[in-house]
Image (cartoon, rainbow, N blue to C red):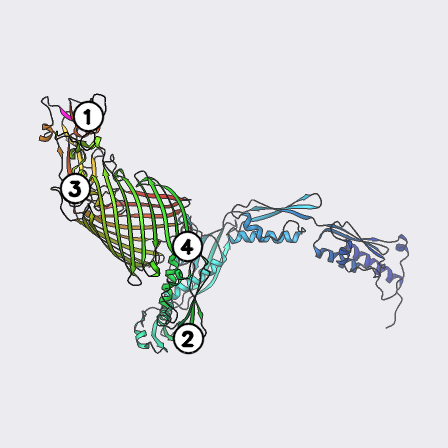
C-alpha cells in the first residue's frame, strides 16, 4: 500500500486532536515543547508515532525507593518514542504499585522526568471506641501493620473487615471512620474511629402459610428468639445469618417429626429496620399433607438376628403418625444392637417409600450383612504422667474379645469419670489388619489433677464460711487420691486428711482412710443460747469391692473419741445438798444431761451401692441406690444398730427438662444395758431433719422437740403462759430413731443466654418426717408447782444458785474437780448470785411440752435456682410448708453462696 503525504490541514487537525487528548486524559503530565514547534510543526514520516525520542529518564522525589526500581515499574525506555499513550500507561503502572500518593511525568525534548511522592510508612495502628470487641479480636483481622507502606485500598479493606466483625456480633449499625495523622520522616498513624452502635436484635418473626401449628409453637422450635423483656438474658435474640439457615432446618425437622414430609420453607427474608437497630424476619412455608406409617418391617441379613423378632420390637406401628425422629432413633438402636453382638461395622439402611394416594410412609430397615468383629489391639497414646495400667483397667473389653459397642461406650464413660483427661475424650475405632479386626485407640490429653482451693462465703445455715483444701486426684500417676482440708464457720470447725487407693495391689479393690477432727457448737441448731458443745476426733478406714459393672460393696470401720460438754456455771447445781454439783435437768433438760460425757465409738459399717448415673456432678439420666448398716458396740461405750437406704432416679423429660426423684430413710435402735429412765439412743446419735434436707423448714425444724414455755405476768399480776411459737420460749430438737424423706424435682431449661450465666431453676416438692424417740421426762416449774414451793424458804423466797468461793475468793471444788454451786435466797432478784442464768431459769415459771413425735408427713413445695455466679456457686430456695405438725419450725427462704479463688 503506497504512502501519501499529509496535507497541511490534516496535519493541523491531527496535532490539535493529539493536544486535546493529552490535556483531557493526562492532566498531571507537563509537556515541554519548543516554542518554534508550535508555529512550525515538525514533519513526520507517515506511519511513525508522533513524539520525541526518549533520551533519558530521571526520577525526582524518591526517598526510600531506588530510582532504578521506580523506572522498572513503567514501560518507558531510552531510545523509544515518547507518546501520550505511553505516558498514560506509565501513570497507570505507577498507580498500580500503590506506593505513591502523587506522581507526574514530564517530557522536555526527550528528557523524561518521573516525579513521585511516596506513600508514608505506617507508624502504628490505633483503635478507638471499641468496647464490645477488644483489640486482640480486631488486630488479627487487619492487614495494615506498623512499618508497612500505607495505601488507601488497604485502609478501605480493613474498614470493611472491622464492620464485618461487628456484623458477626449482631451489630449492623456499626461504622468505622479511618483517620490519618501525618508525622515527620513521612510516617503516619492510622486511627480507626469505631462507633459500635447497639446490638441488632430480632424485633419480630413472622410466619406465613402455617395452618396446623401456631406462630408461637413454631417460634419455640427455632433457635432465634424475638427480643423482649423475658429474653433479656438470652443471646439468641441477636440476628445471625447462619442461625437463620439453621432455623429453617429446625422447622423442617419439626414438621418431619409431626408427619409432614412435604413441608418446605418457600422463602426466609431478614429485613433491617430503617434505624439499623433491629431485624424483622419473615418465613413463607408450605405445610403439605400429614402422613402415617404404612408397612414397617426389618430385613436382617445377619445370621444372628431374626427379621421377625426385630420387626416385632419396633416402637412404631402401622397407622401411627409418621415421625422422622423415630426412624432415626430406630436406625441408631438397631446399629447399637448389632454392635453389642460384635458387628462393629453393621450398616442399617432405612428405605422410605411415600404413597401420596393413601398418605402413608412405608419403611423398611435393612440390616446389611457384615462379619463379626474382634478386638485386635487396645492402644493408649498421649499419657505422660498417668500410667498405662490406670487407663487400661477402665476398659470393659480386652484384646481378642468380640467387639461390643455397649462395652466400648461403658469404657469411654469410665475413663471420662476418672477426671484426668480432656472432656471431649472418645475412644476411636480403627480398622484392623483384616476386615474382621478392629483397633481401639485412646488418644488422651492429660489435664492438671491437682486441686488447691480456698473458698469463702455466707450461708443462711452457718453465716460466714471458710474452707480450704489441697488435693491430688492422680497421685504419682497411679490414680491414687490424697487430700488435706479444713473448714471453719461460726458454729463448727473441722479438719481432715484422706488417702484412697482405687486398685489395691493392682486388684479391683478400693481402699482408703480418713483422719478427722470436728468441733460443733449447737447454736448451729438453735436460735437460743448454745447449750452444749461436741468435739469428735476419729479415724475411718474403708474397703470397696465391685460386684458387677454397676454394683459395689463397701466395708468401713470408724473409731471416734467424742466429748460433749456444757457450761457448768450455767447448767450444774447441787440441789441434792450432797456437796456435789451435777447437771441439773431443771436448768438444761434431762435429755441433754444424758448426753454429757466422754465416750468412745467403735462402728463397723457395711453397704451396697448401685450407680448407673451418666454424671456424678450433674446427672441427667440413670439411677443410684445405697443400702447401709452400721453396728456400734464392738468395743467402745456406745451401742446401737443403724440402717439407712437411699435411691435416686433421673429422667430427661424432653425439651431440656430433667426430672429427678430421691427417697431415703433410716432407723436406729440401741442395744445393751442402760440406766433406768435413760433413752436407748443418745441425743447426738439420732436422726435430725430440717434445712437443708427438707426445704421450707428451719434447721432441725422437723420432728420431736421439747419446748420450754414461760409464764409472763399481765398488767394485773396474773401469770399467763406464752404461746407455743413465742420467740421467748426455749426450743430444743430431740431427733428421732426413724426418718423418711422424698424429694421430687424438675429442672427447667432456659435460653442459651441464661445457660451461659449458669442459671438452672427448678420446682420441687419435699416430703418427710423424723419420729420414734422415747417420751422424755419433762420439767414443770409453774406458780403452783410443789417443786417450786419446796425450793422456797420460810419467807417464801425463791432459791437461786451461785458459785462457792472461800474467804480469799478462790473457787471451792467438788470431788470431780468442778467448782461447787450452792443455793442462795433473794426475795426479788439474784443480788449476790454469781449465776444469773440460773436465776433467769429458776426465777421464771415455765412448763415443758413434748411435741412433733409423729410419722405424719411434712410436705413443702417451692422453687429454687442454682447459679454459677461470678463470685461462686449460689443456691436459693423459696419454699412453703403445705403440711406441718405442732412444734415444727418453718423457714420460707434459704440460700447458700461462696466463691473460689
Q: CA distance from mark 4 to mark 1?
A: 62 Å
Prevailing SS of the magenta stretch: strand
Label 2: which residue?
Answer: 436
- Please state the horizontal and vertical placement of residue 670, each as a whole percent of the image: 16, 48
Q: Which residue is mark 4?
A: 476
The residue nearer to you, when weighing 480 against 346, is: 480
Quarter location, residue 520: top left
Q: Is residue 778 left or right of residue 687?
A: left
Q: Is residue 212 left or right of residue 881?
A: right
The quadrant of the picture occupied by the N terminus is bottom right
In primary-sequence order, the first of circles 1 and 2 is: 2
Does label 2 or label 4 sit earlier along the sequence? 2
Circle 4 SS class: loop
**607 to 373, vertically: above or below:** above
Q: Gap in Å between the C-alphas at discs 1 and 3?
A: 38 Å
Question: Residues at badges 4 and 3 in contact (C-beta under 8 Å)?
Answer: no
Q: Residues within 10 Å of mark 1 (few under 14, many from 20)?
A: some
Disc 1 and disc 3 in contact, CB within 8 angstroms? no
Q: Find residue 338 and report its horizontal and vertical position in percent.
A: 36, 72
Mark 3 and mark 2: span between their CA atoms? 72 Å
The residue to which callout 3 is attached is 851
Where residue 382 appears, as percent x and y from the top left, is 46, 60
The answer to whether residue 797 is magenta is: yes
Residue 804: image tag: 1
Label 3: which secondary element: strand
Amino acid at each position: 500500500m503506497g504512502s501519501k503525504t499529509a496535507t497541511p490541514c490534516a496535519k493541523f487537525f491531527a496535532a490539535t486532536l493529539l493536544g486535546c487528548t493529552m490535556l483531557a486524559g493526562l492532566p498531571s503530565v507537563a509537556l515541554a515543547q519548543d516554542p518554534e514547534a508550535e508555529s512550525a510543526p515538525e514533519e513526520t514520516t507517515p506511519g511513525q508515532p508522533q513524539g520525541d525520542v526518549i533520551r533519558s529518564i530521571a526520577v525526582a522525589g524518591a526517598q526510600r525507593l531506588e530510582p532504578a526500581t521506580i523506572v522498572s515499574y513503567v514501560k518507558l525506555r531510552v531510545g523509544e518514542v515518547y507518546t501520550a499513550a505511553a505516558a498514560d500507561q506509565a501513570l497507570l503502572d505507577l498507580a498500580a504499585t500503590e506506593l505513591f500518593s502523587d506522581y507526574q511525568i514530564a517530557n522536555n525534548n526527550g528528557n523524561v522526568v518521573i516525579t513521585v511522592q511516596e506513600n508514608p510508612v505506617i507508624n502504628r495502628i490505633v483503635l478507638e471506641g471499641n468496647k464490645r470487641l477488644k483489640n486482640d479480636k480486631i488486630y488479627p483481622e487487619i492487614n495494615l501493620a506498623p512499618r508497612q507502606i500505607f495505601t488507601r485500598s488497604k485502609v478501605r479493606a480493613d474498614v470493611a473487615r472491622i464492620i464485618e466483625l461487628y456484623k458477626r456480633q449482631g451489630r449492623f449499625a456499626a461504622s468505622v471512620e479511618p483517620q490519618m495523622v501525618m508525622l515527620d520522616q513521612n510516617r503516619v498513624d492510622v486511627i480507626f474511629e469505631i462507633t459500635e452502635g447497639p446490638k441488632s436484635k430480632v424485633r419480630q418473626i413472622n410466619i406465613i402459610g402455617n395452618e396446623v401449628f401456631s406462630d408461637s409453637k413454631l417460634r419455640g422450635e427455632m433457635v432465634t428468639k424475638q427480643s423482649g423483656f423475658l429474653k433479656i438474658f438470652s443471646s439468641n435474640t441477636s440476628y445471625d445469618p447462619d442461625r437463620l439457615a439453621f432455623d429453617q432446618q429446625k422447622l423442617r425437622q419439626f414438621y418431619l417429626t409431626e408427619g409432614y414430609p412435604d413441608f418446605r420453607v418457600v422463602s426466609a427474608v431478614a429485613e433491617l429496620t430503617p434505624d439499623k437497630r433491629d431485624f424483622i424476619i419473615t418465613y413463607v412455608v408450605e405445610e403439605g399433607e400429614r402422613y402415617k406409617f404404612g408397612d414397617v418391617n426389618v430385613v436382617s441379613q445377619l445370621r444372628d438376628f431374626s427379621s421377625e423378632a426385630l420387626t416385632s420390637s419396633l416402637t412404631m406401628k402401622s397407622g401411627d403418625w409418621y415421625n422422622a425422629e423415630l426412624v432415626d432413633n430406630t436406625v441408631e438402636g438397631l446399629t447399637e444392637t448389632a454392635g453389642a453382638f460384635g458387628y462393629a461395622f453393621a450398616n442399617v439402611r432405612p428405605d422410605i417409600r411415600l404413597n401420596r394416594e393413601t398418605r402413608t410412609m412405608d419403611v423398611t430397615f435393612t440390616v446389611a450383612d457384615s462379619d463379626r468383629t474382634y478386638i485386635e489391639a487396645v492402644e493408649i497414646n498421649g499419657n505422660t504422667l498417668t500410667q498405662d495400667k490406670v487407663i487400661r483397667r477402665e476398659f470393659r473389653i480386652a484384646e481378642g474379645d468380640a467387639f461390643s459397642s455397649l462395652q466400648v461406650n461403658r469404657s469411654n464413660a469410665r475413663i471420662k469419670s476418672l477426671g484426668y483427661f480432656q472432656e471431649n475424650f472418645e475412644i476411636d475405632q480403627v480398622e484392623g489388619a483384616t476386615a474382621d479386626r478392629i483397633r481401639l485407640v485412646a488418644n488422651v490429653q492429660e489435664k492438671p489433677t491437682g486441686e488447691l482451693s480456698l473458698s469463702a462465703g455466707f450461708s443462711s445455715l452457718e453465716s460466714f464460711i471458710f474452707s480450704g483444701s489441697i488435693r491430688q486426684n492422680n497421685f504419682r500417676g497411679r490414680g491414687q487420691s490424697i487430700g488435706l482440708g479444713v473448714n471453719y464457720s461460726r458454729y463448727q470447725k473441722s479438719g481432715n486428711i484422706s488417702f484412697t487407693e482405687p486398685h489395691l495391689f493392682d486388684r479391683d479393690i478400693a481402699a482408703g482412710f480418713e483422719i478427722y477432727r470436728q468441733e460443733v457448737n449447737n447454736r448451729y441448731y438453735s436460735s437460743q443460747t448454745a447449750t452444749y458443745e461436741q468435739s469428735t476426733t476419729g479415724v475411718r478406714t474403708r474397703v470397696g469391692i465391685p460386684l458387677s459393672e454397676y454394683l459395689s460393696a463397701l466395708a468401713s470401720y470408724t473409731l471416734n473419741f467424742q466429748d460433749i460438754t456444757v457450761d457448768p456455771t450455767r447448767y450444774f447445781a447441787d440441789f441434792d445438798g450432797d456437796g456435789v454439783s451435777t447437771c441439773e435437768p431443771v436448768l438444761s433438760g434431762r435429755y441433754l444431761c444424758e448426753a454429757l460425757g466422754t465416750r468412745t465409738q467403735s462402728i463397723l459399717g457395711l453397704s451396697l451401692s448401685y450407680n448407673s448415673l451418666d454424671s456424678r456432678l450433674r446427672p441427667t439420666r440413670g439411677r443410684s441406690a445405697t443400702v447401709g448398716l452400721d453396728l456400734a458396740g464392738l468395743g467402745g461405750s456406745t451401742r446401737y444398730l443403724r440402717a439407712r437406704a437411699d435411691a435416686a432416679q433421673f429422667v430427661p423429660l424432653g425439651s431440656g427438662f430433667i426430672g429427678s426423684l430421691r427417697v431415703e430413710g433410716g432407723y436406729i435402735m440401741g442395744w445393751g444395758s442402760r440406766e433406768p429412765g435413760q433413752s436407748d439412743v443418745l441425743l447426738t446419735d439420732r436422726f435430725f431433719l430440717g434445712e437443708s434436707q427438707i426445704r421450707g423448714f428451719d434447721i432441725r425444724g422437723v420432728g420431736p422437740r421439747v419446748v420450754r414455755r414461760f409464764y409472763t405476768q399481765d398488767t394485773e399480776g396474773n401469770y399467763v403462759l406464752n404461746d407455743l411459737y413465742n420467740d421467748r420460749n426455749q426450743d430444743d430438737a430431740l431427733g428421732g430413731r426413724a426418718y423418711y424423706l422424698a424429694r421430687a424435682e424438675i429442672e427447667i431449661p432456659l435460653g442459651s443466654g441464661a445457660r451461659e450465666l449458669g442459671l438452672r431453676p427448678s420446682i420441687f416438692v419435699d416430703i418427710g418426717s423424723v419420729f420414734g424417740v422415747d417420751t422424755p421426762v419433762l420439767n414443770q416449774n409453774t406458780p403452783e408447782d410443789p417443786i417450786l414451793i419446796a425450793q422456797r424458804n420460810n419467807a417464801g423466797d425463791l432459791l437461786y444458785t451461785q458459785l462457792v468461793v472461800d474467804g480469799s475468793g478462790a473457787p471451792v471444788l467438788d470431788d470431780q474437780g468442778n467448782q461447787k454451786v450452792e443455793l442462795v435466797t433473794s426475795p426479788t432478784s439474784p443480788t449476790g448470785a454469781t449465776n444469773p442464768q440460773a436465776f433467769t431459769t429458776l426465777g421464771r415459771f415455765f412448763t415443758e411440752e413434748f411435741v412433733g413425735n409423729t410419722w405424719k408427713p411434712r410436705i413443702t413445695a417451692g422453687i429454687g435456682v442454682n447459679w454459677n455466679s461470678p463470685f461462686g456457686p449460689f443456691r436459693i430456695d423459696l419454699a412453703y410448708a403445705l403440711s406441718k405438725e405442732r412444734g415444727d419450725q418453718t423457714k420460707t427462704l434459704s440460700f447458700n453462696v461462696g466463691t473460689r479463688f
